[in-house]
């Protein structure tokens, strides 16, 4: 499975580099943004965090790509394993059966069927590889709605393979006065616990089912000020994570995270 996912990720990376010198570029659209976040009451990691996030989203003749990279900094604290700052990122190419084959896979509210893949990476963390089916859904009121079902595999021998993850991704635009509020985000729901077949000491730290809900609520400030819409946003990000990182919440070590961060986001 890891070999197949690595091949898919490599294919996506090659496609990203194939824009130049093409008579008909496979790139259909793209969007980049920079977000600044400031929040507190985080769990597992230090209490207060400041994060700068670069995001890229694009549509291609073969599917779509989403990539983000967080640069995370801790206020007046150090993480025991990471120091005063760290990074985390994800690379998510999805391969459209409709675009690749030229056939129509739509039915009901389903617009397209895809092979979804994700590579998760971070400082001093295991790298995770995810693969599974995905669908694009046409749901009234939503700008877009994606639903992906993943099989998770880690490259660490301390984390068992085989967890199943459900990931919906969405966006909704709500007109407000002379501007808009954009609500977008994702949910990562790892639905099953996994037990490592190793020493009995590790069984106390098995990878537990966890639920991560991470929407952003943003006001289009640029549009409100008379500038171009969909460029400058202000708002907040909500972060709820039950059993963060798959670590079971307990009285001795709280891992259930429930916090907000103020944000400024610019699309360029």
Image (cartoon, helix red, strand yellow):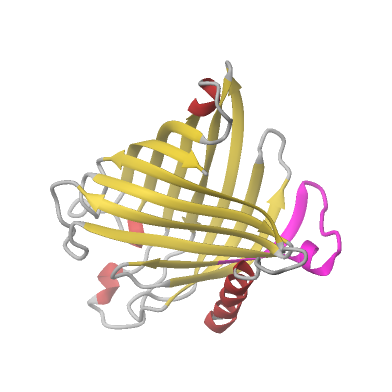
Residue 153 lies left or right of residue 249; in this view the side is right
| Magenta stretch bounds | 96-117
Q: Residue furthest right?
A: 103
Q: Is residue 95 visible?
A: yes
Q: Identify which residue is drawn at 30% across, 53% down.
A: 72
Q: Position of residue 2 (x, y in %)?
A: 52, 80
Quarter assignment of residue 98? bottom right
Q: Determine whether 260 is above or below 68 in the image.
A: above
Q: Position of residue 182 (x, y in %)?
A: 55, 33
Q: Residue furthest left?
A: 76
Q: Position of residue 267 (x, y in %)?
A: 51, 42
Quarter assignment of residue 158? bottom left
Q: Quadrant of the N terminus?
A: bottom right
Residue 217 lies left or right of residue 206; in this view the side is right
Total tally of numbered discs in the picture: 0
Residue 184 lies left or right of residue 80; in this view the side is right
Q: Identify which residue is drawn at 32% across, 48% down.
A: 51
Q: Identify which residue is drawn at 71% across, 40% down.
A: 139
Q: Identify which residue is drawn at 57% across, 71% down.
A: 13
Q: Is residue 20 magenta?
A: no
Q: Is residue 243 visible?
A: no
Q: Residue furthest top?
A: 177
Q: Determine whether 45 is above or below 173 in the image.
A: below
Q: Determine whether 53 is above or below 228 in the image.
A: below
Residue 214 lies left or right of residue 180; in this view the side is left
Q: Is residue 106 magenta?
A: yes
Q: Position of residue 167 (x, y in %)?
A: 55, 55
Instruction: Compare residues 241 and 226 and report the one nearer the observer.
Output: 226
Q: Determine whether 95 is above or below 56 in the image.
A: below
């Amino acid at each position: 499975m890891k070999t197949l996912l690595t091949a898919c990720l490599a294919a996506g990376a090659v496609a990203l580099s194939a824009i130049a010198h093409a008579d008909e570029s496979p790139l259909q659209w793209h969007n980049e943004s920079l977000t600044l976040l400031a929040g507190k009451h985080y769990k597992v990691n230090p209490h207060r965090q400041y994060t700068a996030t670069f995001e890229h989203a694009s549509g291609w003749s073969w599917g779509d790509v989403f990539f983000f990279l967080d640069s995370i900094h801790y206020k007046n604290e150090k993480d025991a394993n990471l120091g005063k700052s760290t990074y985390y990122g994800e690379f998510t190419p999805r391969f459209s059966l409709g675009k690749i084959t030229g056939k129509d896979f739509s039915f009901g509210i389903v617009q397209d069927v895809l092979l979804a893949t994700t590579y998760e990476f971070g400082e001093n963390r295991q790298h995770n590889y995810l693969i599974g089916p995905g669908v694009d859904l046409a749901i009234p009121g939503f700008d877009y709605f994606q639903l992906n079902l993943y099989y998770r595999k880690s490259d660490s021998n301390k984390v068992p393979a085989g967890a199943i993850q459900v990931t919906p991704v969405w966006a909704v635009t709500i007109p407000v006065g002379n501007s808009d509020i954009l609500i977008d985000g994702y949910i990562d729901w790892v639905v099953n616990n996994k037990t490592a077949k190793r020493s009995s000491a590790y069984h106390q730290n098995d990878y537990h089912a966890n639920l991560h809900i991470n929407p952003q609520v943003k006001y289009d400030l640029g549009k409100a000020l008379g500038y171009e819409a969909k460029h400058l946003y202000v708002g907040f990000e909500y972060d709820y994570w039950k059993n963060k990182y798959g670590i079971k919440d307990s009285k001795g070590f709280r891992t259930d995270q429930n916090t907000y961060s103020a944000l400024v986001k610019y699309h360029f």
